[in-house]
Image (cartoon, rainbow, N blue to C red):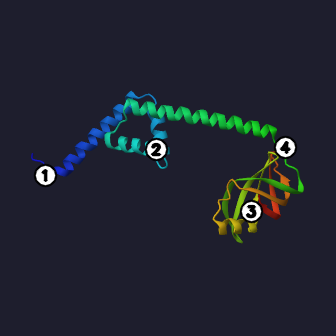
Amino acid sequence: MPIVNLQAWENGRHRAIISNAQKTFFATVEDANDILDWVHYNSENNDFALSLSNAFEKFGKLTEGQCNAVRKCIARAEENRAKWQAKNEQERANAEDVPEGRIQITGVIVSTKFYDNDWGTQLKCVIKDDRGFKLFGSIPSSVEDYACSEEIDLKGLRITLTATVIQSDDDTKFGFFKRPSKASII
């Protein structure tokens, strides 16, 4: 019987070759799932991972050298994660407990996020105080307005303000602030 649609036949043959290559790859590479998880997770922001993802899609496998490179990346990431965790634990051990009441806060903004509520959108942040504890609350509008007008990223900015602080119920090194005033960027 002659081939009616040569392109469809060629596409099917190519899919079969890729499928067989993938089956062989998973059968012969012990940590194939870990390797491909790393490749897919990092392919959006890492050109190397994107090239490996494209290679796997095109050929149905990765070479031994590519697999070894990914294993090194995974090991480096785990090492960095362990260092980061040890550093955070050390900082946490040295941090003071969150004081309560109306206090002055001086520290660095470590993260920001917009939250929607009944009154519109609010920009909130986590501030790591110089005494080591972290506080969550609304960024004062004066600081937000200044940062927007000057096109400054708030993350990493040193700030000082006065606010009412309460300690978290389940963590003495974390708390919440409200009614911030006298805010300024240092």
Q: Quadrant of residue 66?
A: top left
Report, in whole angstroms, how far the alpha carbon at label 3 lies from the one at label 2.
Answer: 36 Å
Q: Circle 3 — which element?
A: loop
According to the picture, the residue beneath numbered tag 2 turns out to be 40
Residue at the extreme right:
101
Q: Which residue is mark 4?
A: 96
CA gap, disc 4 and disc 3 = 22 Å
Q: Would residue 23 be found to the left or right of residue 132 on screen?
A: left
Q: Secondary structure at mark 4?
A: loop
Query: Is the C-beta separation of discs 3 and 2 under 8 Å?
Result: no
SS type, badge 2: helix
Q: Amino acid at mark 3?
A: Ile
Q: CA distance from mark 3 to mark 1?
A: 67 Å
The residues bearing labels 1 and 4 have C-alpha atoms spaced at a distance of: 77 Å
The x, y position of residue 58, in whole percent, is: 32, 43
Kind of residue at badge 2? His
Q: Quadrant of residue 136?
A: bottom right
Amino acid residing under circle 1: Val
Closer to the chain start, of discs 4 and 3, is: 4
Q: Are marks 4 and 3 in contact (CB under 8 Å)?
A: no
Q: Quadrant of the C terminus?
A: bottom right
Asked whether 155 or 19 is in front, the reply is 155
Sequence order check, earlier mark of 1 and 2: 1
Q: Nearer the viewer, residue 97 or 171?
A: 97
CA neighbours of label 3 inside 10 A, class few (<14), some (14 to 19), many (20+): many
Q: Residue at x 56, y 36 (%)?
A: 77
Q: Residue at x 23, y 43 (%)?
A: 13
Residue pointed to by mark 3 = 139
Which circle marks residue 4 in the picture? 1
Q: Give the alpha-carbon distance from disc 1 to disc 2, as whole Å.
A: 37 Å
Amino acid at dot 4: Glu
- For the N terminus, the image quarter is top left
